Image (cartoon, helix red, strand yellow):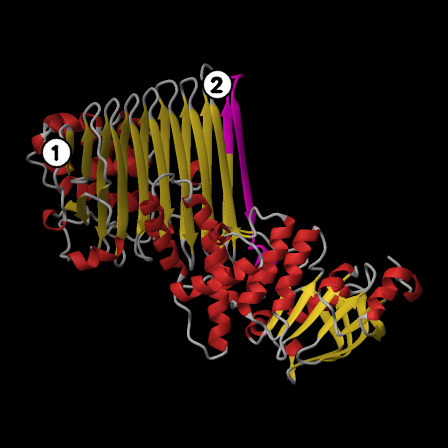
Amino acid sequence: MLEIKNLHARISEGREILKGVDLTVKPGEIHAIMGPNGSGKSTLAGVLSGKPGYEVTEGQVLFQGRDLLAMAADERARDGVFLAFQYPVEIPGVNNMYFLRAALNAVRKRRGESEMDAGQFLKAVRAKLKLLELGEDLLQRGVNVGFSGGEKKRNEIFQMAMLEPKLAILDETDSGLDIDALQMVSRGINALRAPERAIVMITHYQRLLEHVVPDRVHVLSGGRIVKSGGKELALELEQTGYGAYGDAA
Amino acid sequence: MSALAEIQPYVEAFKARPRAAEPAWLKQRRDGAMQRFAEIGWPTRKQEAWRFTDLQPLQRAPFPPASAASLITAADLAPWIYAEAAHRIVLVDGTFVPELSTVGALPEGVWLGSTAQTLRDRPELLNGALRETDTLGAQPFVALNAALFTDGFVLALEPNAVLDRAVEIVHFGRAAGRSAHLRNLILLDIGSRATVIETFAGEGTYWTNAVGVIAVGAGAALRHVKLQDESGAAIHLGHQRVELGRDARYENFTLSLGGRLARTDIHLKFDGEGAACGLFGATLLRGEQEGTIATVVDHATPRCVTREYYKSVATDRAHGVFLGTIGVRPHAQKTDANQLSKNLLLGARAAIDAKPELEILADDVKCSHGATVGDLDETALFYIESRGIPPVDARRMLVEAFAAEVIERIEDDTAMRAHLGRHVARWLAGGVA
């Protein structure tokens, strides 16, 4: 599904942040990438999703065998890459429902499916809203406008549930969530676990991993993956901290 | 062309026009106005109010007044028709066309007709149509309009008359190389209430020179919407002179989309205490369009409120201008005025000039103003694109949202907001560079 080979990247005109990341994620797997602040976690999410402002200086990323880095952000999304933002963006004046429907139809068109009419769309939306305990009034508001921090994160997972990506990258989705919101978000992610789908969770803390159990855990430090293991590695990190991996927070 | 040569064709046109049936007072005022126009000539960029406006498209060749209405059909007007309107006046090339108009049943105390018809049947209503400023002011296009106008519309409400549904005025231009000089009046007497939408549209190269005289009496309320959607080759100069009585309410929304050269001037004066105005609008510009919004608000009386909010978007090589002056006279205490101009500059060769201005001579007032010029929010663009929406659609969404935010200021009128929203969407379908 996803093959990252010797990936080097820097902030445009800035210092190098990723210094040779190697990672392979297979369909059906959930991987957790953990690491201290400044280790390159958000840069990795940004590079994979096509966020402007980064420059890849070396290496390769293949998504379903295709050169992911050659694709524009919107093209990646239509092909099934989804990024759940650490800081979801407020877009006043763009109605949430209108936005989501445009996104869904763009993705469906790429998959060779017909556009959804208003009725079908609303039916699909209602089921997913319930999963994340979001109110229907959210649809009539501007995208992320007036949402609490928890609502914004739940809205990200709600969008993911609607768009049904092949590869989901969750950037610090657990940050700033209270325990109830964490459970809702976790439920949303677990519901999307599927043999044909891969999920990469980027997180600083272990607590999300208690609710969404990963197949693999990686430690990102100093721009490289310095250790990989099973779910027990997360617990180990919880006890020892990132100190042992240099570049402490 | 020299300055004199430029105005000569208009002087000739004035001399040549048939003027048999007009009352003496009107002839006299027209003579005075023409004389004034000949004295001051075209504005130049040395004048502050015209400093940013490039009048070249108007000065390249003369636009003699159109002599009659071009033949057009209801189908030609269809894209602009406001379905919610109950009364409609259509003017083509500056002349009333009864076959396309539906004045409809009017409640008692309401007059709606063409200016020419009003001059015949209710001449007293037109006394206020020509002002001192036509013959003494420094507004050459207003003076020229006073000299040359033949038609327009007049809406007059007697005290406490109420129009529940909108009055729609469609000005359509199609006479190639010609000008239309419209003199329009909206007179709301004490306690009356109305909504008027004026639409300017057309085909080809022509010049619309419209002057509106608007008086809102004590406790009366007028919502006045202007949809300027002239043809891309046309010139539009629209000047509105507004006077508000005690506790009057006036709301003006200008959506400006068309014209090679387009300018809307609003001169508003508070004539009584406790009145309020809302001046709002959005201007969308592409290609080589030149678009100006110029407002002058005169707080001549205490306790009046001004809310002013204009937005503009300039793409390609277009040029947008906002000139806003709010003046507060020495005795106009408790004035509450704010003015905001927000602009999106979307082309490397596009330009925007914004010049907000406050002149405050009273000491117990609350006044503020501001202007911003920016680009589309990069993080918002990426967010939208990251959901699979192509960049071109993402840009369109953000520009639409930018315009929608000011259209929202038209409160309690979903149908009007939707109507303007559709025209914004239609403009956006042409792409945002």
| Real-space CA distance between mark 2 and mark 1, rounded to the nearest whole angstrom | 40 Å
When the figure is inspected, residue A175 is found, relative to residue B162, above or below; the finding is: below
In terms of depth relative to the viewer, which is nearer, B318 or A121? A121
Instruction: Tell me which label, 2 or 1, sits earlier in the chain.
Output: 1
Q: Indicate the chain on which mark 1 is placed.
A: B
x and y, in percent, of residue B353 in the image: 50, 45
x and y, in percent, of residue A112 in the image: 46, 80
Tags 2 and 1 on a common chain: yes
Question: On the rendered structure, is B6 left or right of B357?
Answer: left
**Disc 2 residue type?**
Lys
Q: Tell me which corner region of the image, top left, top right, bottom left or bottom right, holds residue B218.
A: top left
Q: Mark 1: few, some, or many residues within 10 Å (few <14, many ≥20)?
A: many
When the figure is inspected, residue B104 is found, relative to residue A18, above or below; the finding is: above
Are the two marked residues, 2 and 1, in contact with CB atoms closer than 8 angstroms?
no
x and y, in percent, of residue B181 in the image: 22, 42
Instruction: Residue B361: say if magenta.
Output: yes
Question: On the rendered structure, is A177 left or right of A156?
Answer: right
Q: Is residue A43 visible?
A: yes
Q: Mark 2: few, some, or many residues within 10 Å (few <14, many ≥20)?
A: many
Farthest right residue in view: A244
Instruction: Residue B289: say if magenta.
Output: no
Q: Indicate the chain on which mark 2 is placed.
A: B
* Callout 2: SS: loop
When the figure is inspected, residue A2 is found, relative to residue A245, above or below; the finding is: below
**Disc 1 residue type?**
Thr
The disc placed on residue B334 is 2
The disc placed on residue B249 is none
Q: In this figure, which residue is indicated by the disc labeled 1?
A: B118
Q: Which residues are magenta?
A: B357-380
In terms of depth relative to the viewer, which is nearer, B17 or B131? B131
When the figure is inspected, residue A179 is found, relative to residue B293, above or below; the finding is: below
In terms of depth relative to the viewer, which is nearer, B209 or A86? A86
